[in-house]
Image (tube, helix red, strand yellow):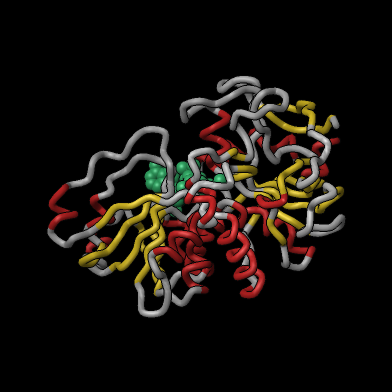
Amino acid sequence: MTVNAYGAHAGDKPLEPIEITRRAPGLQDVQIDIAYCGICHSDLHQVRAEWAGTLFPCVPGHEIVGRVSAVGAQVSGFAVGDLVGVGCLVDSCQHCEDCESGLENYCDNTVLTYNSPSAEAPGHTLGGYSEQIVVHERYVLHVRHPEEQLAAVAPLLCAGITTYSPLRHWNAGPGKKVGIVGIGGLGHMGVKLAHAMGAHVVAFTTSDSKRQAALDLGADEVVVSRNPEEMAKHATSFDLIVNTVAAPHDLDAFLLLLKRDGTMTLVGAPATPHPSPGVFNLILKRRSIAGSAIGGIPETQQMLDFCAEHGIVADIELIRADEINTAYERMLKGDVKYRFVIDNATLSA
Ligand code: NAP
Ligand code: ZN
């Protein structure tokens, strides 16, 4: 089927309306009419070819929510009319150790929602800036929030799970001091989630103007990271820091805030590397620097259910499809609180 989408034909070209085709649902496939799709900073990195290997035309989008419009004959978990979500993954090998552990996000053969090689036209996957998507049921999530919150649920599918997974893995909870660095799409979800898990949450921002806003999100304290005196007050005190910053920066400034055995996990993925951290800052307190990629499918469902139970959604600005290029520029300036979400009904306008 031919559907309307928004995509780019080259890294230096803006996104524009484009027609794409979707397969008819196979036996285990779920066909979804996409209602909303969030704009992740990864979309911008990818569509502008800042990371290696962008395949064009590129239709980004991996924060997808909508309603099931058809299911294959062997689909057991979903029915027409269900509210569902799709995140960054649409397939994986399904039998390696990672897949069998429900950590499909670490499979060596993941098929990402966009920009992964595919047998279908145009030879690679195309994402959620489109009217419809067809996905194997294993990679489709149930949305249990009220329907009126659907647009604000979309960012949970990437920004939500990418912060939830490391917070869980490194045991954020009561009695733990957790830092979230960069209060953008990922970071604002990190603050909300760490707060709901019961941790003492400190938001680190470069923007003085986000001070009150970060407290409103649930942070117990806010530190403007450009201010060395404010930073020094938190020396050697954190159990965990989740760093979402999308640009290279001085990691030592944050490493020094970890207590003995503390971990800073990097989830931000800048196009060029961070300056190498000082080895003694690691050695002397047995500190760790780690990384974390989105989350597995069972954990993504767990995160969505946790958010539904705690009334957590993203803070969003809903936009029309023809505002996507402007939204990218504003995201680069940090001018969004905190996630742009596309109203996919405007793709056909
Ligand atoms: P975003 O909304 O643009 O937020 C990034 C935040 O980082 C900004 O709001 C800003 O926060 C801070 N920041 C940006 N530039 C900075 C600079 N030069 N110096 C210091 N701080 C800066 O982006 P996002 O969608 O949250 O994504 C963040 C990063 O995570 C991107 O690189 C994205 O590709 C990556 N990502 C990784 C995964 C994964 O699986 N690991 C998944 C999704 C996204 P303040 O104004 O508060 O300082
Ligand atoms: Zn993302």
Q: Is residue 299 left or right of residue 267?
A: right
Query: Which residue is pictured at 52% across the width and 48% down the height?
Result: 105
Residue 341 vs residue 18, the one in the foreground = 18
Query: Which residue is pictured at 32% across the width and 43% down the height?
Result: 249
- Residue situated furthest front in the rendering: 95
- Examine the image and state in which quarter residue 284 appears: bottom left
- In this rendering, is residue 274 above or below 260? above
Query: Which residue is pictured at 72% across the width and 27% down the height?
Result: 120
- Find residue 277 and report its horizontal and vertical position in percent: 22, 45
- Residue 160 visible in image: yes
Residue 40 vs residue 336, the one in the foreground = 40
- Find residue 144 and report its horizontal and vertical position in percent: 73, 67
- Residue 334 visible in image: no
- Examine the image and state in which quarter residue 327 appears: top right
- In this rendering, is residue 286 above or below 92? below
- Find residue 212 and report its horizontal and vertical position in percent: 48, 66
Q: Is residue 115 left or right of residue 277?
A: right
